Image: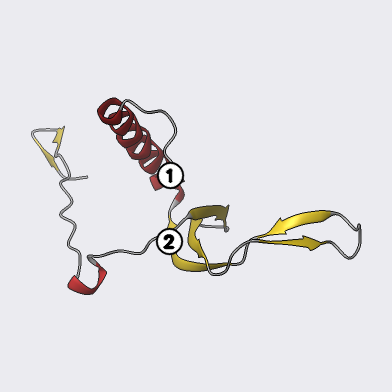
Amino acid sequence: MAKVNDQPLEHRVEIAVTPEKEVGEYASFASVWRAQDCFVIDFATEVRPPEVSEDPDSSTRYVHVPARVVARVRIPPGQVWELMKALEQNLSAYERETGGGEAEA
């Protein structure tokens, strides 16, 4: 980290979004998993209506939800805490503004 008079300088990241990505992707859910050197978040959306299926090994019935990943994001472990803090801050602000608890799915 750069220093001036032994004081660390503030980092200000300027994020630019290309025009083709400005609209974003809709995702109805996310899956989080980890690899050796990063955390992976798969954002996905349903592609067909859910259907009741049966596990051939156990005969257990379950609801099968066909989904497709619309974006896969890999982040270094050090960024996970920053992401969690940003999500918590934004969720708290959303709850204050809307007076609601859990967001509608």
The reply to whether residue 71 is in sight is yes
* Of the image marks 2 and 1, the number of the one nearer the N terminus: 2
Colour pattern of the rendering: secondary structure
Q: Which residue is mark 2?
A: 73
Q: Which three-letter amino acid code belongs to the residue tagged 1?
A: Val
Element marked by disc 2: strand
| Residue 31 vs residue 102, the one in the foreground | 102
State the image coordinates of residue 68 (x, y, percent, origin top left). 53, 69
| Residue 43 vs residue 11, the one in the foreground | 43
Residue plotted at (71% across, 56% down) = 63
Q: Which residue is mark 1?
A: 80
Left or right: residue 37 compared with residue 103: right
The reply to whether residue 38 is in sight is no
State the image coordinates of residue 86 (x, y, percent, origin top left). 32, 38
Left or right: residue 105 compared with residue 55: left
State the image coordinates of residue 74 (x, y, percent, origin top left). 44, 60
Residue plotted at (35% across, 64% down) = 25
Residue plotted at (30% across, 33% down) = 94
Element marked by disc 1: helix
Find out whether the residues at labels 2 and 1 contact each other: C-beta distance under 8 Å: no
| Residue 53 vs residue 21, the one in the foreground | 53
Q: Nearer the viewer, mark 2 or mark 1?
A: 2
Left or right: residue 37 compared with residue 88: right
Image quadrant in which the N terminus is located: top left
Q: Residues within 10 Å of mark 2 (few under 14, many from 20)?
A: few
Q: Residues within 10 Å of mark 1 (few under 14, many from 20)?
A: few
Q: Which three-letter amino acid code belongs to the residue tagged 2?
A: Val
Left or right: residue 75 compared with residue 18: right
State the image coordinates of residue 59 (x, y, percent, origin top left). 90, 58
